[in-house]
């Protein structure tokens, strides 16, 4: 494990030093990678750990984002307040969906469809909430682009980068802790064989709910960040099923259920996607949708040839554990 | 010797098909009893009703003095009953030791304590050398041992074994029999087993209950039951003129 | 709110619903038999719509005639997709297969975006613009013809499964995979055949749909979800259920457009899906597994 710790420390050091050497474009790409790494970690808790396939995670990103943005827009309350409302709302939503699904015995693909239905329902619903901007969108004033206001999340791009880095590191630590704990063992047991887990005394309903709620809460935080980083929200965009798919690409490509998978997957995907878009633009081909086609192809390739994701194979080469 | 498990008048039907009808039997503390009968006799249904997978249509089940019929499987486990499945259900993606740790966590106050207990059980069941292998890589006899180890890790008072000997060679069967004898003798674990393999039934069971078409048709020591006319008829059919 | 108007609206919903039903029928056949959650279903429908548009724009081919070549091509492609991509992974866990098709759908939608751009395309045929009068009722000719084609195709499919030997073999596979193999049926081939048939249905539905609405690439995911709503509401494994579900959704969308804002009409479909999943997962006509 020492080797793993050393490599990890090296990685964190590099990431911490990045803003000092990178230009604003690279910094924004790095921030995006960390965002997807964080959101992917959150989703991974539900799917990779507990085995519940959610394709509607954009719901939590959106509700979290709108909750925080709404508070700031209407009452001037910064991210410090918004984050609590966002988490509370998403915990309630996640609990509701989980309760409905698990009480009624919905699992697998049907559960996935249920999560999609909730996200879509909310997407169309928010189009009709004028108090939050409706289809035209909600815009937050972009001010103080210099200096750091962590409490209100207003500041320089570097601040956002470090916030996202801290969040991702915290998520990593949280997931590592969870995996090693009773929760981790129980979740994996439920994922592998729910019936056998029950026969060993595990209240699978309670533990599945826990996974859903933790996942929702973490994703809510991602939503809050999204709101204050991009400063504009449209229901059509943030609740769209493409957002949900983007969130899951990282963990699936990197490695479901692993700690590093979501981070690695997000990095590989974003870097390659941006690289390809830049390359094509340089050749004069600017098409909307190229990036997504690329995502699709990579996803297809990974599912077909590396079903456990890139990380397990890479980890073996590097000689580290999970 | 007090009664640990008491099954009284259990009936269970599935969409009109009566799987178990008015079955009653008991398992005293510290004994090993077997439930036998031809295929489709309702043995696994009995187990599933006891283990909480189904609620009985009628009847009552008392364990350690408390009624347990209608409880969920995880509640039944917490009451002190461990079970194995006829078709083994290992946690394929986890290692052998991790499988057993999941079971051990039921009664262990912490993860380290569970790991310790799990390690002991893994050794006891002869899986020590394979503890870090993925469960999916095990042979069938080892998978059966893992299934038993996992259930044992929950520190049950009663162990329900569902056709654990099926598919094992005679030497492997004897090894399992020895393990169960030892646990029963040393820890006083009560065992109720469903078995087709008569070798194991004769060697282990002190008392046998015979089911046919969902009803109890005979009970007694193995020697008595093997000679019982009703039992012979249900296994071999009516005597034909040769 | 003139009652005649409402009836006209409901009838229009029924006709559109029949085309939806044909699309869902394709999914029901695929989902019900091969047990593949075809997440690319709506995207396939959208591709068929674009095919009709292109054939009309370049060759002047009437969609009612284009139906045949498009269906044939889709049959072949569907067969190839199942045989080449899905069959090899049939032993993988459920969510793996699902994600496979999510990936395919992603590629399809964005390939369309690259090829055709985001603006809407349609097929304009003069003879479709006339209305048919039935007493006080006014029916859109295009809708009537499209619905008739949908019904005819559905009837053909029903007949295939009920009367032909291959159809019965496919039903056998659906009922009992292992048993089918034991009696010597080439299950992989039959699965591919079924996917091909489902795709052909989608192709016909698409060619008809483009007469009713304009096509944009983003319709793909919307139709996929709609197809699932219909199949689940109507009942998995029930072909009549798929058609019935389609009509139900068509009518409810028409009425929802009347009573609530039109943009909220899909909310109703999703709400219905949630209710059905929770309360009656086997759908209206499906069998409880």
Image (cartoon, grey):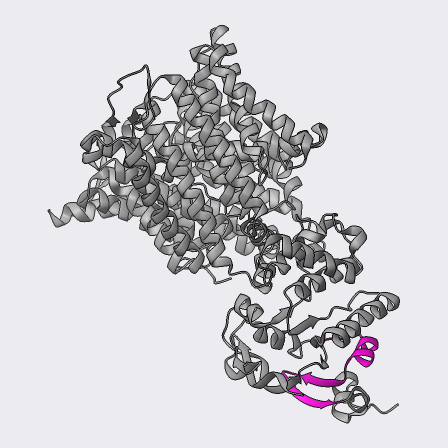
* Residue C71 shows in the view: no
Does the stretch in magenta take in B204? Answer: yes
Which of A118 and B26 lies nearest the eye of the viewer? B26
In the current view of this chain or complex, which residue is farthest to the top?
A283
Does the stretch in magenta take in C206? Answer: no
How far across and down, in percent of the image, does residue A61 sit? Answer: 37, 36
How far across and down, in percent of the image, does residue B18 sit? Answer: 57, 80
Q: Give the quadrant of residue A227.
A: top left
For residue B196, side relative to residue B12 (left or right): right
In the current view of this chain or complex, which residue is farthest to the left?
C1
Point 80% across, 59% down: residue: B126
* Residue C5 shows in the view: yes
Which of A94 and A175 lies nearest the eye of the viewer? A175
**C10 above or below C73?**
below
* The N terminus of chain A sits in image quarter: top right
Which of A258 and C278 lies nearest the eye of the viewer? A258
For residue C18, side relative to residue B191 (left or right): left
Which of C167 and A55 lies nearest the eye of the viewer? A55
For residue B104, side relative to residue C152 (left or right): right
How many marks are shown on the rendered structure? 0
Q: Which residues are magenta?
A: B194-220
Point 82% across, 65% down: residue: B168
Point 71% across, 90% down: residue: B218
**A45 above or below C70?**
below
Q: Give the quadrant of residue C64.
A: top left
* The C terminus of chain A sits in image quarter: top right
**C161 above or below A41?**
below
How far across and down, in percent of the image, does residue C116 sit? Answer: 41, 20
How far across and down, in percent of the image, does residue B210 sit? Answer: 71, 85
């Amino acid at each position: 494990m020492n080797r793993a710790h050393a490599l990890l420390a090296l990685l964190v050091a590099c990431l911490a030093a990045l803003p000092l050497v990178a230009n604003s474009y690279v910094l924004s790409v790095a921030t995006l990678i960390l965002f997807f790494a964080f959101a992917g970690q959150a989703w991974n808790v539900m799917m990779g750990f507990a085995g519940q396939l959610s394709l509607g995670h954009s719901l939590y990103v959106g509700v979290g984002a709108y909750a925080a943005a709404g508070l700031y827009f209407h009452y001037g309350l910064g991210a410090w307040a918004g984050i609590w409302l966002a988490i509370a709302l998403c915990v309630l939503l996640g609990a509701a969906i989980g309760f409905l699904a698990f009480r009624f015995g919905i699992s697998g693909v049907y559960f996935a469809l249920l999560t999609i239905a909730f996200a879509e329902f909310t997407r169309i619903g928010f189009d009709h909430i004028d108090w939050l901007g409706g289809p035209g969108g909600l815009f937050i004033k972009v001010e103080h682009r210099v200096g750091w206001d962590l409490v209100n999340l207003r500041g320089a791009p570097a601040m956002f980068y470090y916030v996202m880095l801290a969040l991702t590191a915290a998520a990593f630590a949280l997931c590592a802790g969870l995996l090693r704990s009773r929760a981790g063992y129980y979740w994996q047991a439920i994922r592998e064989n729910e019936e056998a887990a029950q026969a060993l005394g595990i209240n699978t309903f309670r533990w599945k709910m826990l996974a859903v709620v933790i996942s929702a809460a973490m994703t809510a935080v991602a939503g809050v960040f999204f709101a204050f980083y991009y400063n504009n929200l449209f229901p059509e965009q943030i609740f769209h099923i493409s957002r949900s798919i983007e969130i899951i690409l990282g963990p699936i490509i990197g490695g479901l259920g692993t700690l590093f998978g979501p981070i690695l997957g997000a990095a590989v995907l974003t870097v390659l996607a941006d690289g390809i878009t830049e390359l094509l633009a340089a050749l004069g081909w600017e098409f909307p949708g190229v990036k997504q086609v690329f995502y699709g192809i990579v996803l297809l390739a990974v599912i077909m040839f590396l079903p456990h994701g890139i990380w397990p194979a890479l980890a073996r080469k590097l000689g580290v554990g999970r | 010797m007090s009664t640990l498990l008491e099954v009284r008048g259990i009936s269970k039907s599935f969409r009109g098909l009566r799987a178990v009808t008015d079955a009653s039997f008991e398992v005293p503390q510290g004994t090993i009893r077997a439930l036998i009968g031809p295929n489709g006799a309702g043995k696994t249904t009995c187990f599933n009703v006891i283990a909480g997978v189904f609620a009985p249509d009628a009847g009552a089940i008392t364990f350690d003095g408390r009624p347990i019929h209608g409880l969920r499987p995880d509640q039944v486990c917490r009451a002190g009953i461990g079970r194995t499945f006829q078709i083994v259900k290992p946690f394929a993606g986890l290692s052998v030791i991790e499988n057993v740790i999941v079971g051990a966590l039921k009664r262990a106050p912490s993860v380290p304590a569970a790991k310790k207990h799990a390690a002991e059980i893994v050794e006891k069941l002869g899986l020590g050398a394979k503890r870090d292998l993925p469960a999916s890589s095990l042979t069938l006899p080892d998978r059966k041992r893992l299934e038993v180890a996992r259930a044992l890790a929950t520190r049950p008072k009663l162990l329900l074994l569902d056709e654990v000997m099926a598919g094992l060679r005679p030497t492997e069967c004897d090894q399992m029999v020895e393990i169960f004898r030892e646990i029963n003798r040393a820890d006083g674990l009560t065992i109720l087993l469903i078995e087709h393999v008569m070798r194991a039934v004769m060697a282990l069971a002190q008392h046998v209950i015979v089911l046919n078409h969902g009803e109890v048709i005979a009970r007694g020591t193995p020697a008595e039951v093997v000679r019982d006319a009703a039992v012979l008829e249900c296994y071999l059919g009516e005597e034909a003129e040769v | 709110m003139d009652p005649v108007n409402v009836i006209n609206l409901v009838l229009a919903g029924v006709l559109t619903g029949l085309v939806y039903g044909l699309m869902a029928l394709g999914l029901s056949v695929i989902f019900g038999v091969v047990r593949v959650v075809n997440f690319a279903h709506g995207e396939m429908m959208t591709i068929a719509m674009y095919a009709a548009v292109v054939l009309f724009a370049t060759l002047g081919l009437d969609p009612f005639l284009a139906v045949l070549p498009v269906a044939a091509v889709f049959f072949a492609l569907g067969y190839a997709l199942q045989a080449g991509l899905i069959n090899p992974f049939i032993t993988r866990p459920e969510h793996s297969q699902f994600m496979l098709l999510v990936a395919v759908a992603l590629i399809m939608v964005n390939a369309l975006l690259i090829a055709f751009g985001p603006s809407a395309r349609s097929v304009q045929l003069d003879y479709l613009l006339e209305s048919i009068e039935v007493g006080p009722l006014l029916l859109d000719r295009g809708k009537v013809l499209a619905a008739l084609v949908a019904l005819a195709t559905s009837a053909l499919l029903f007949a295939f499964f009920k009367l032909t030997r291959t159809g019965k073999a496919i039903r056998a596979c659906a009922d009992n995979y292992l048993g089918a193999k034991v009696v010597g049926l080439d299950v992989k081939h039959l699965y591919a055949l079924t996917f091909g048939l489902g795709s052909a249905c989608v192709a016909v539905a698409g060619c008809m749909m483009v007469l009713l609405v304009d096509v944009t690439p983003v319709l793909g995911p919307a139709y996929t979800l709609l197809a699932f709503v219909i199949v689940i509401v109507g009942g998995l494994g029930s072909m009549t259920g798929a058609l019935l579900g389609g009509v139900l959704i068509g009518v409810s969308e028409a009425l929802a457009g009347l009573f609530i804002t039109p943009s909220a009409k899909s909310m109703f479909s999703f709400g219905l899906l949630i209710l059905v999943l929770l309360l009656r997962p086997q759908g209206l006509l499906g069998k409880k597994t």
